[in-house]
Image: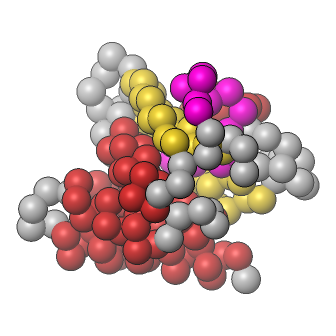
Amino acid sequence: MNRYEIRLSGAGGQGLILAGIILAEGVILEGGYNVVQTQSYGPEARGGASKAEVVISPSIIYFPKVTNPDLLLTLTQKAYDKYVKDLKPNGILIADEEIDTEDLPSTIEVYRLPILRTAREELGKSLVANIISLGVICGCLDFISSEKLKEAVLARVPKGTEELNTKAFELGLRMQKEAKK
């Protein structure tokens, strides 16, 4: 791997900025890579556009922005419509099950998963959709272990929510493994 670009996109309030920070910290804990994390969100605190980007490289990162993601997470249709065109032709798309992903090139590895529904219905907290997403992402990457990313998750989540977030992360890992079969 020379340079790996990840974009997490959706709406404000979905915890994607935190997810980007956790992902970057997990890669750092794994060791052997330089990592840059950037973020942007609309003026609305909740519901506006939101994205976090992570660039990973074994060498110096001269440009910190994602231009053509190798992996794109989209939790809203609006984010999908805006960013899917940037995804590399052989990239990975992780999209919530509600997103219409028609007409993608066959070279893109697509995971349409019930991320938001699982957070809401199985865990009773929409707020952990970002941690479920990190579990799915971890299952797609071979340069970060689930142990290191889970360690980063537990270092960042609010005290008293460790068990819930561990369960969310592990659900995401399982979701991705089942989808890959």
Residue drawn at the location 52% of the way across and 42% of the way down: 34
Q: Residue furthest left?
A: 160
Say which quadrant the C terminus sits in.
bottom right
Residue drawn at the location 36% of the way across and 39% of the way down: 17
Residue 14 falls inside the magenta stretch: no
Q: Is residue 158 left or right of residue 149?
A: left
Q: Which residues are magenta?
A: 60-75
Q: Position of residue 86 (x, y in %)?
A: 73, 31
The rendered magenta stretch, by its main secondary structure, is classed as: loop
Q: Position of residue 171 (x, y in %)?
A: 43, 76
Residue drawn at the location 61% of the way across and 79% of the way down: 177
Q: Position of residue 167 (x, y in %)?
A: 32, 77
Please state which of residues 122 and 158 is positioned toward the viewer in this rendering. 158
Please state which of residues 17 and 10 is positioned toward the viewer in this rendering. 17
Q: Quadrant of residue 156?
A: bottom left
Query: How is the structure coloured here?
Result: secondary structure
Residue 7 in sight: no
Q: Is residue 43 left or right of residue 104?
A: left
Residue 92 in sight: yes
**With respect to residue 125, does 79 lie above or below?**
above
Q: Is residue 118 left or right of residue 1?
A: left
Residue drawn at the location 31% of the way across and 67% of the way down: 151
Q: Quadrant of residue 119?
A: bottom left
Q: Position of residue 83 (x, y in %)?
A: 65, 32
**With respect to residue 36, does 169 lie above or below?**
below
Q: Is residue 166 left or right of residue 178?
A: left
